[in-house]
Amino acid sequence: MNQQEKLNASLKYLRRRNNPRAAEEDERRKKGEELPTPEELHEKDEEIPLEKGDLRAMIFAAMVTIIPVSLLVLLVLCGIVWLIFFH
């Protein structure tokens, strides 16, 4: 086995490990079938149902992200108003 074959085998292993759909794509290529379009893959992803606590976790993550930023913006605006009118 030469270096190029070893490299190709390593890349194929990493591709399959990092991309769960890679094995399916390889099988389709071997059979000569067409690969799915991005739209078909997107539709497949939309069919995945949420688990029990997913919605609560997404709302919590949004609050943790948005509330501190909005408070910082509000603080800056209040500081500007204070400087203009009360200083």
Image (tube, grey):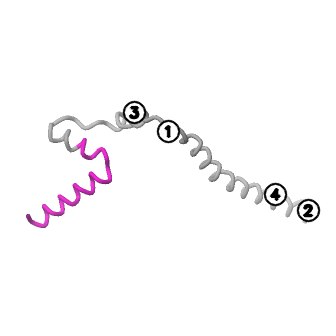
Residues drawn in magenta: 1-25
Please rate how many residues cluster around mark 1, counting C-alpha atoms within 10 Å: few if below 14, some from 14 to 19, many from 20: few
Q: Is residue 46 left or right of residue 86?
A: left
Q: Earlier in the sequence, mark 1 or mark 4?
A: 1
From the image, tell me which residue sits under label 3.
43
Relative vertical location of residue 3 with respect to residue 67 in this rendering, above or below: below
Q: Kindly identify which numbered label has been placed on residue 78.
A: 4
Q: Looking at the picture, which amino acid does disc 3 mark?
A: Glu
Three-letter residue code for mark 1: Glu
User: CB of mark 1 within 8 Å of CB of mark 3?
Assistant: no
Q: Identify the residue position indicated by label 1 in the image.
A: 51
Q: Earlier in the sequence, mark 4 or mark 3?
A: 3
At 25% from the left and 41% from the top, the residue drawn is: 24
Identify the residue shown where x is 32% and y is 49%.
19
Q: Callout 4: 10 Å neighbours few (<14), some, many (20+)? A: few
Vertical order, 44 against 60 (above or below): above
For the residue pair 61 and 32, the one nearer the viewer reads as 61
